[in-house]
Amino acid sequence: MTSSIYVMLFHLAVALMIFLGMNWLGRHSSMLGYESLTMFEERDESVAFNFVFRVATPVVILAIVAAICYALNLDGFTRNLYLAVVYSILFRVLFGLLMGRRLLLPWGRVACQSLATIAAAYVAYKYVISSRERLLPDPDSIANEAWLAIVVYLYLLAGHLSSKSASHDRRSRAYVEQRKSALAKQFGGVLRGLGNERWQMLVLAVMIVEDFNRPKMARCIERILFPLGLVRTQGIMQVSTKGPISDEESIKRGSGLLKDAYRQAIGGTEWRVSWHGGMERKQQMEEQNLVHSTLVAYNPSGDYARDVQEVFERLLASSEGAAALSLHPDASVHGEGQA
């Protein structure tokens, strides 16, 4: 009889495999409509695909793991194997909370999908997985049809009913506001020394996106790994450095890199700032294009630049003072500057 503690540890290992496996499969299924968590607008979502993917994939993994156990005569490890699905859901929720995604997660949908997944796993375990005879393929058993269904599922993984969620926009706005308040409170002194309020908003937008991609927990791990040469960037602004630096120092360096990139985007042409913060140049370039060029120079990912611009626009919309200022890094706090 397999010890209960070993069975539980095995279930936890399977749960981790389900958690990591679904993440991997999800990334490689995005072309088929898999919905991943983003900070802003959701991708067009295939409702049928996402529901089937999130509910059926853990059950398929359970069936494969159980079949391997039976083949190796480790039947004891299949006892109450459906609990691995429960643990994997707990892992996913805990991961979301530790990564600071609480405000972004659609908790109602998460609850419904979790209950459906647990129910499907339990039914599959009770009527198929718990029995070697019912699970393993046999010419005289219905298990052949079950395995055929699994093969078809793994091949198709498809669905084409599209939908967009307005609730995600509300969650993303709440997330941006929460991170703005928290980061401004923590680093307000550093931000105020970088330039006028409009420039501070741009730097803060970069900080929010970087904090989303690498929250505090991840940055703590990076500080541990940095002396080993396993990471090259440090701090909340994720700047390249040869030695460990604080978040405050990374903000100063990151702002400097952004200023250099902005000046390069302007290209040294003449400019002047009107009272309303408008920029007039020999060759007109919209601020949006300037910001995009600046961000691409800071991080070449197009998605990154899009996310930061989205945050920047939302921060400006909530800040009346910044709207009347110039974004130019050499502008004063009153919107004036010189080339």
Image (cartoon, rainbow, N blue to C red):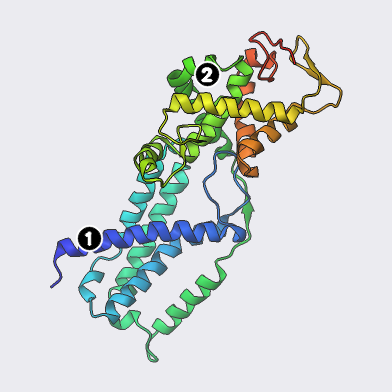
Q: Residues within 10 Å of mark 2 (few under 14, many from 20)?
A: many
Residue in view at x 64 percent, y 35 percent: 295
- Of 209 and 244, nearer the camera is 244
Q: Position of residue 263 (x, y in %)?
A: 70, 26
The percent position of residue 13, horizontal first and vertical second, equals: 29, 61
Question: Relative to 160, is 218 on the left or the right?
Answer: left
Q: In terms of image quadrants, where is residue 198?
A: top right
Percent x, y for residue 328?
69, 20
In terms of secondary structure, where does tag 2 sit? Answer: helix
Dot 1: within a 10 Å radius of its alpha carbon, few (fewer than 14), some, or many (20 or more) residues? few
Residue 320 occupies quadrant: top right
The amino acid pointed to by label 1 is: Leu
Quadrant in which the N terminus is drawn: bottom left
Looking at the image, which residue is at 45% across and 64% down? 56
Cα distance, mark 1 to mark 2? 47 Å
Q: Which residue is mark 2?
A: 191
What amino acid is found at the position of numbered circle 2 in the picture? Leu
User: Can residue 318 be seen at all in this image of the molecule?
Assistant: no
Residue 207: x and y in percent read 52, 30
- First along the sequence among labels 1 and 2: 1
Question: Where does the C terminus fall, quadrant-wise?
Answer: top right
The tag on residue 9 is: 1
Eye-nearest disc, 1 or 2 = 2
Quadrant in which residue 122 is drawn: bottom left
Image-based side of 328 in relation to 228, left or right? right
Kindly identify which numbered label has been placed on residue 158.
none
Is residue 89 in sight in this rendering? yes
At x 70%, y 35%, the residue is 293
